[in-house]
Image: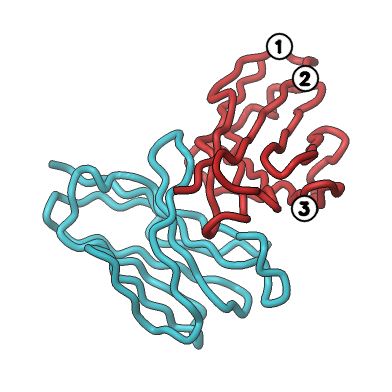
Chain colours: A red, B cyan
Amino acid sequence: GAVVSQHPSWVICKSGTSVKIECRSLDFQATTMFWYRQFPKQSLMLMATSNEGSKATYEQGVEKDKFLINHASLTLSTLTVTSAHPEDSSFYICSASGGPGYTFGSGTRLTVV
Amino acid sequence: SQQGEEDPQALSIQEGENATMNCSYKTSINNLQWYRQNSGRGLVHLILIRSNEREKHSGRLRVTLDTSKKSSSLLITASRAADTASYFCATPGSLYNTDKLIFGTGTRLQVFP
C-alpha cells in the first residue's frame, strides 16, 4: 500500500535554531502534501497545503515565514520550523494525496528547549 | 473554525462492549471519513461514507451519516484492548475544495482487558 515516510520521528532542539522535517512518498507520487500540527490530547490542525512545484497555501493564523514548506518534487515535501521557540513544541504530521486516498506520515514530535 | 465536534471526548469500556462515538460537522459535505490514531503515531484510515449513503459497514465498524443533522457516528462492536486509540472524523474543506481534510476534535477510547 501507499507509504509516507516521515523523519525524524522525534527531535529536541534549542530555542532559536531551525528544524527540518521531511516527508517522502515511497511508492506513489504525492501531488499534494498537507501539514498538520497536533497538541497533546487535541485534534489535528491543518497548517498548510502544498502542491508540487508551487508555493504552499497557509491556513489563517499560520506564519508562513516561520513554517517554511517546500514541495520541490512529487515524492518529497519538507517543513522547516525556523527560529523555533518552546511554544512551537508539538507533534507535526504530514499527509499526502496522489495515492489511494490520504496517506499519513508517522509524525514528528518536536521539543524546543 | 470549521472543525467538527466529537463526543464523547473520552470513553472507557471493557473488552467485548460496544463503543459509539459521534461527530458533528458544520458545512455541507460530499463525504466523511473516520481515522484512528494510536498514541504518538500517524493516522490510519478506517472508513469513508459518501453523502448519499446512510450507513456503511467494515468488519466490526459501523458508520452512519445523517446529512440533515450534519452528524455521523462510529460504532465499534465487540471491542478489544487493541482498539484503544483516538478516533477522528474528517470532512473535506468544502464542497468546492475537497482536497484538504478538516478533523473533528476526536474521541479517546480506552478498552480495558
Residue behind mark 3: A59
Badges 3 and 2, same chain: yes
Q: CA distance from mark 3 to mark 1?
A: 26 Å
Total marks drawn? 3
Picture coordinates of residue B9, whole percent (x, y): 41, 54
Badges 3 and 1, same chain: yes
Chain identifier of the residue bearing label 2 in the image: A
Instruction: Using residue B62 as the reference point, say whether residue A76 is left or right of it.
Output: right
From the image, which quarter does the N terminus of chain B lie in? bottom right
**Residue at x 40%, y 51% (from the top left corner):** B36
- SS at mark 3 in the image: loop
The residue closer to the viewer here, B83 or A61, is: B83
Residue type at tag 3? Glu
Instruction: Using residue A91 as the reference point, say whether residue B106 is left or right of it.
Output: left
Chain identifier of the residue bearing label 1 in the image: A
**Residue at x 23%, y 43% (from the top left corner):** B82
**Residue at x 11%, y 55% (from the top left corner):** B16
The residue closer to the viewer here, A49 or B85, is: A49
Chain identifier of the residue bearing label 3 in the image: A
- SS at mark 2 in the image: loop
Picture coordinates of residue A40, whole percent (x, y): 51, 36
Residue A18 marker: 2
For disc 3, the neighbor class at 10 Å (few under 14, some 14 to 19, many from 20) is few
Query: In the figure, B56 relative to A107: above or below?
Result: below
From the image, which quarter does the C terminus of chain B lie in? top left
Q: Are marks 3 and 2 in contact (CB under 8 Å)?
A: no
Q: CA distance from mark 2 to mark 1?
A: 9 Å
- SS at mark 1 in the image: loop
Residue A14 marker: 1
